[in-house]
């Protein structure tokens, strides 16, 4: 393996794994903050801002090619103030400058490279730059020389190029907040038509390669199918989930109770076959919910098994001993312990000879080879960089049952045969050098994981899922929550919590607490969700135009506050927050929260009306807001068999617009009576679209009621 670096810079004092990866560069990196800003002002030099993350493949490439090069480092140190940012620690900052890069170049990605004036106005940007001129791009060294020369000889030209960005942002914000008449039904129909036009009927997903899972689109489709009785929408979502699970983007090697499995970031091809091999917590948490929804929508056990496969990965490979979930695993790793360089996917790919040497019965191995599409020459035909020559990326090319018939294995033994071979491969793979684990714990992503596990417990009844969700929530509340200030922090690593929470930290963690509360009815989680919602509204809500800024009013390090208006790999903070506001309004009777949700819809009305596919999660919530959804109040002993059975009926039926509250929460909300220490009979009270029906107290009565009131 590569020898340790001897040089250290200012990043050695940071906690981010990404920043620490660059602590040995000869570049005199500084973290984002006043120290860097002051240096730029005092030396009258532009800032070179480099933004990436620890598991980013092309970030590693640019480091090897440029940031580890002494000559390039000398250019950066002499003519610029070099600044490194972990985008996962500062998503609002990343979003701000990515907006500039995309607007000025028509593309984006990481590593992001942006040159700034000392007042933080950008004047030039891009993503990855090669060390020399190639790929039709200027070399990084060429750019550094050109910008340094221009800064010295014609600074006014640079100053002129930097003046328009923040002004344009303000104009865009003003235009966005000019509300338009919003027809929610028309907007949802338009979004569905867009998905129809982009849908790949053979391989699932939307649009050409590279293909990203984007779980919010699946949530929209299942919700649209449910509310509009549209089987085509459900079919599109289910077909996409099946195809993703069959592909190499889904790690086909796992061991129950040990680890492996889960999903990689995205597929480089249309078939979900060859992934970019990094694994992210936020992807897997959201995809777990997508597969749970797929199971409830279809009743097919296959989708449930994939959800449980993801949970196996999260609990075994991604949860810290303290309870919080780690952020990601890298795409790159060393092929062997004595390898000099890392390679993408080295931990996951297999050669024909490697498989032949494993202690597996010939018939079982042949069965596995047919099932997974393994070829002696490798099974990656489209490999422009030659990274996977002779390698096989495992996928499910045919069903185990069909492959079993070809090799003489009885159909009833097909699944067990594949599992046995998979176990051998898992044990062998664990002897390889593992990819880097980005072990920082991010509040927002933990909120997503808590939601997924809480939902998993409600559907499957497995206590380990509830225990893991509670452990993660308690970790955040103990380590990343300031009790005195009532505020969240964003990142925990190596015994230290830091960085003020962003809007998504509040939104996703509140969502996680509400989902966890509805899994266990521990009022502590409900109460914290209420308190954090109040704090989020204080710090992030735009009380003039509506919606949530990504950055708090108290954060002066980000030069412009944006409202995220895209449900992408992660949903926008406002999209999640409007659902939180509506649920809390229903559960507490506080109509002021519902009014704030309506302000959010108004603020984004133009985007929802004209480009609703950018905000599918908010569109889904808009329909819930207009129709009222399903609200349930339960009373009685939570351990009673009748109440547990009634909750199971609710939890195992696809009803995306349901909220459930136990009457004991009246102490917190101030609703109802205050005699919660007195025994109350087991009862379930249900309201549908703001119309309530008589309470029921038995599972049979609840089934009859649902059949009569809910389609």
Image (cartoon, rainbow, N blue to C red):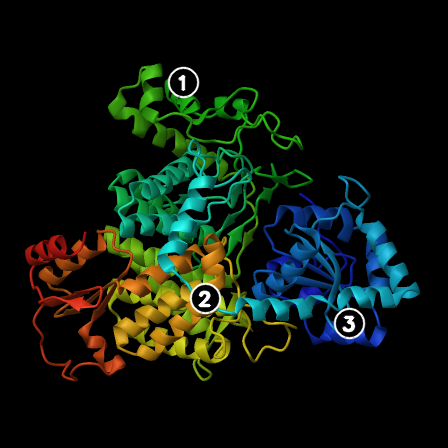
Direction from residue 67 to residue 534 in the image, left or right = left
Q: CA distance from mark 2 to mark 3?
A: 31 Å
Comparing 455 with 204, the one in front is 204
Direction from residue 127 to residue 505 in the image, left or right = left
What residue is pinned by disc 2?
A: 574
> In front of the other: label 1 or label 3?
3
Residue at horizontal 52%, vertical 70%? 177
Comparing 415 with 625, the one in front is 625
Question: As displayed, is residue 290 above or below residue 529?
Answer: above
Q: CA distance from mark 1 to mark 3?
A: 66 Å
What residue is pinned by disc 1?
A: 362
Q: Is residue 322 visible?
A: no
Q: Which disc is residue 118 wearing?
A: 3
> In front of the other: label 2 or label 3?
2
Question: As displayed, is residue 263 above or below residue 457?
Answer: above
Q: Which disc is residue 414 wearing?
A: none
Residue at horizontal 60%, vertical 54%? 54
For this orientation, the residue located farthest to the front is 181
Q: Secondary structure at mark 2?
A: helix
Indicate the quadrant where residue 438 lies. bottom right
The image quadrant where one finds the N terminus is top right
Indicate the quadrant where residue 25 lies. bottom right
Residue 471 at x, y percent in the picture: 36, 64
Marks 2 & 3, CB-CB < 8 Å contact: no
The answer to which of marks 1 and 3 sits earlier in the sequence is 3
Q: Residues within 10 Å of mark 1 (few under 14, many from 20)?
A: few
Marks 1 & 2, CB-CB < 8 Å contact: no
Residue at horizontal 26%, vertical 77%? 589
Residue 619 at x, y percent in the picture: 40, 58
Direction from residue 198 to residue 85 in the image, left or right = right
């Amino acid at each position: 393996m590569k020898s340790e670096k001897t040089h250290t810079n200012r990043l050695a004092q940071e906690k981010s794994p990404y920043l620490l990866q660059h602590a040995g560069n000869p570049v005199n990196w500084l973290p984002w903050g006043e120290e860097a800003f002051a240096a730029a002002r005092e030396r009258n030099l532009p800032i070179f801002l480099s933004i990436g993350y620890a598991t980013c493949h092309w970030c590693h490439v640019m480091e090897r090619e440029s940031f580890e090069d002494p000559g390039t480092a000398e250019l950066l140190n002499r003519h610029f103030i070099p600044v490194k940012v972990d985008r996962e620690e500062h998503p609002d900052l990343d979003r701000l400058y990515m907006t500039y890069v995309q607007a000025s170049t028509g593309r984006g990605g990481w590593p992001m490279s942006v040159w700034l004036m000392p007042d933080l106005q950008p004047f030039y940007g891009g993503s990855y730059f090669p060390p020399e001129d190639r790929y039709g791009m200027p070399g990084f060294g060429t750019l550094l020389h050109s910008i340094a020369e221009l800064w010295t000889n014609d600074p006014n030209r640079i100053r002129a190029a930097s003046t328009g960005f923040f002004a344009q942002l303000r104009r865009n914000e003003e235009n966005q907040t000019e509300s338009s008449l919003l027809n929610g039904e028309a907007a949802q129909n338009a979004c569905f038509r867009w998905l129809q036009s982009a849908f790949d009927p053979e391989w699932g997903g939307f649009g050409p390669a590279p293909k990203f899972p984007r779980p919010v689109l699946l949530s929209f489709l299942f919700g649209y199918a449910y509310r509009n009785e549209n089987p085509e929408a459900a079919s599109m979502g289910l077909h996409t989930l099946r195809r993703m699970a069959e592909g190499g983007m889904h790690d086909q090697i796992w061991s129950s109770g040990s680890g492996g499995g889960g999903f990689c970031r995205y597929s480089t091809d249309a078939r979900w076959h060859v992934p970019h091999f990094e694994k992210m917590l936020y992807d897997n948490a959201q995809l777990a919910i997508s597969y749970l929804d797929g199971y409830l929508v279809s009743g097919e056990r296959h989708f449930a098994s994939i959800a449980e496969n993801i949970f196996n990965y999260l609990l075994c490979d991604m949860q810290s001993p303290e309870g919080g979930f780690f952020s990601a695993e890298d795409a790159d790793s060393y092929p062997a312990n004595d390898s000099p360089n890392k390679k993408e996917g080295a931990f996951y790919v297999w050669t024909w000879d490697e498989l032949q040497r494993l202690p597996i019965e010939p018939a079982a191995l042949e069965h596995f080879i047919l099932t997974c599409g393994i070829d002696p020459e490798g099974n990656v035909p489209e490999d422009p960089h030659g990274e996977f020559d002779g390698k096989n990326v495992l996928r499910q090319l045919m069903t185990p049952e069909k492959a079993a018939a070809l090799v003489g294995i009885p159909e009833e033994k097909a699944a067990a045969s594949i599992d046995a071979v998979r176990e051998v491969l898992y044990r062998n793979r664990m002897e390889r050098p593992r990819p880097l684990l980005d072990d920082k714990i991010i509040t927002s992503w933990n909120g997503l994981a808590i939601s997924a596990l809480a939902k998993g417990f409600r559907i499957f009844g497995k206590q380990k899922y509830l225990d893991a969700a509670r452990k993660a929530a308690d970790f955040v509340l103990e380590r990343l929550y300031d009790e005195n200030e009532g505020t969240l922090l964003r990142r925990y690593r190596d015994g230290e919590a830091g960085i003020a929470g962003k809007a998504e930290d509040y939104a996703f963690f509140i969502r996680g607490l509400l989902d966890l509360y509805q899994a266990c009815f521990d009022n502590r989680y409900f109460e914290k969700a209420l308190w954090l919602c109040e704090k989020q509204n204080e710090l992030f809500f735009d009380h003039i135009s509506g919606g949530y800024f990504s950055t708090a009013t108290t954060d002066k390090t980000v030069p412009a506050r944006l409202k995220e208006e895209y449900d992408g790999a992660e949903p926008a903070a406002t999209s999640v927050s409007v659902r939180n506001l509506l649920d809390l309004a229903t559960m507490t009777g506080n109509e002021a929260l519902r009014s704030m949700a309506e302000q959010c819809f108004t603020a984004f009305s133009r985007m929802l009306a004209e480009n609703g596919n950018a905000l599918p999660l908010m569109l889904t919530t808009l329909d819930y807001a207009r129709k009222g959804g399903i609200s349930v109040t339960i009373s009685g002993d939570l351990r009673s068999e009748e109440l547990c059975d009634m909750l199971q009926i609710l939890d195992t039926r696809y009803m995306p617009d349901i909220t459930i509250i136990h009457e004991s929460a009246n102490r917190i909300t101030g609703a109802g009576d205050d005699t919660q220490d007195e025994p109350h009979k087991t009862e379930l009270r249900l309201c549908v679209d703001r119309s309530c029906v008589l309470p029921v107290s038995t599972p049979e009565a609840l089934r009859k009621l649902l059949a009569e009131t809910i389609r």
